[in-house]
Image (tube, grey):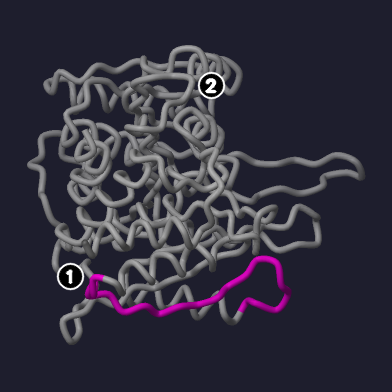
Amino acid sequence: MLASVRASSSSALRAAVNASRTNIPMRTMATVLDDARLPSKIGGKYTVTLIPGDGIGKEVADSVKEIFESIKVPVEWEQYDVSGETTGGDDLFRQAMESLKRNKVGLKGILYTPIDQTGHNSWNVAMRQTLDIYASVVVCKTLPGFPTRHKDVDFAIIRENTEGEYSGLEHQSFPGVVESLKVSTRAKAERIARFAFDFAIKNNRKKVTCIHKANIMKLGDGLFLNTCKRVAEKEYGHTGIQFDSMIVDNTAMQLVSKPQQFDVMVMPNLYGSIVGNVGAALVGGPGIVPGCNFGREYALFEPGCRHVGKDIMGTAKANPSALILSATMMLRHLGLDTQANLIADAVYQVIAEGKVRTPDMKGTNSTNDMTKAIIDKVTA
């Protein structure tokens, strides 16, 4: 069972990205990325951009680095301590972006985005839009040894990462009147729909559900829903994968009442953020849910539930599991399956045993305790 948890979101990612590049309905499924789109390997090591992020970012990034070092994972880090909390960090952010373009693979924590109007726009969103990292994948699955309210939860959230309400196009048309534009395009809806179906095929999943609000946003969400329907019928009708749809507010209720009904869920940007948070809560919280983001050229790995964790920053209470598991997904992307499996197995074994748990998992152990327990497993 541990192996199925570990592999549930990784085996199809490279193939799904490749398949999403073409409009041909019938396609073969590649199992590796083109060499031209993999990072270069210098001196036997891959160079990866590391952006620890704000809040607990540096603490959990240190855990990843310690674990990698303990088994000599052939990864060299280019670290950029970008922060969304300080002013004047634009130059460092640009340097981090150049590093991502050069290395093509990155591991990051979550960057803080200020709420006040004078603050900068989200650098998390800017990365995804600038590099066209269009597909977010988060798998919410019940973990052995860590019971929650619902049993046998196992669904994947495929989120369109680059448009929708996150387009950042808003203005005040008259004092006290703000217009915020939601951008939806057929091309990007087609792309994410194909990604979702290709993911389902490669992971032996049976159903894809489109999440929408087309009853109200008849043009915007209507375009997304109708595009997903057309892709399902014309391009994947022969696969046997079921397709259905659900209004987003009903989805929220169904998730907390009967989450087992969901398999693969595909949705626009904002709904993906909300559903991702609900999904994480169903299986144990943001500290244990990994995530990844894919585009045509670049891959960025980060915790599936995008929380900064400012409230526990510096208290040594952070659960490093989400970022560690995200890092193992990155290793599989690089073809380092042996190291990825070793580390992921160790994380799941520590969780299943229940002897070492951070406060978010109703334990009293520290970030360092969790890291040490994982290292003890991988070096045993």
Q: Which disc, if any, is residue 77? A: none
Q: Where is residue 263 in the image (x, y as percent from the top left)?
A: 32, 23
Residue furthest out toward the left: 28
The answer to whether the residues at label 1 and label 2 have Cβ atoms under 8 Å apart is no
Tag 2: Cα neighbours inside 10 Å, few (<14), some, or many (≥20)?
some
Q: Where is residue 123 in the image (x, y as percent from the top left)?
A: 58, 62
- Residue 328 inside the magenta-drawn segment: no
**Which residues make up the magenta segment?**
71-90
Say what secondary structure mark 1 lies in: helix
Q: Is residue 25 visible?
A: yes
Residue type, label 2: Val
Please give the residue where the numbered disc 1 appears in the rendered image: 36
Residue at the image position 21 percent from the left and 68 percent from the top: 38
| Residue position marked by numbered label 2 in the rendering | 248
Residue drawn 80% across the image and 56% down it: 117
- Separation of residues labelled 1 and 2 (CA atoms): 39 Å
Q: Relative to residue 340, is residue 193 drawn left or right? A: right
- The answer to whether any part of residue 187 appears in the image is no
Amino acid under label 1? Ala
Q: Residue at x 26, y 24 (%)?
A: 232
Kindly identify the residue that appears in the image at 55 percent across and 54 percent down.
318
Which quadrant of the figure contains the C terminus?
A: bottom left
Res. 78 image quadrant: bottom left
- Front residue of 311/301: it is 311
Relative depth, front residue between 222 and 79: 79
Q: Is 294 located above or below residue 45 in the figure?
A: above
Q: Which of marks 1 and 2 is nearer the N terminus?
A: 1
Horizontally, residue 355 falls left or right of residue 56, namely left
Quadrant, the N terminus: top left
Residue 84 is a magenta residue: yes
Pick out the residue farthest to the bottom.
Answer: 43
* Depicted 356 relative to depicted 220: above or below: below
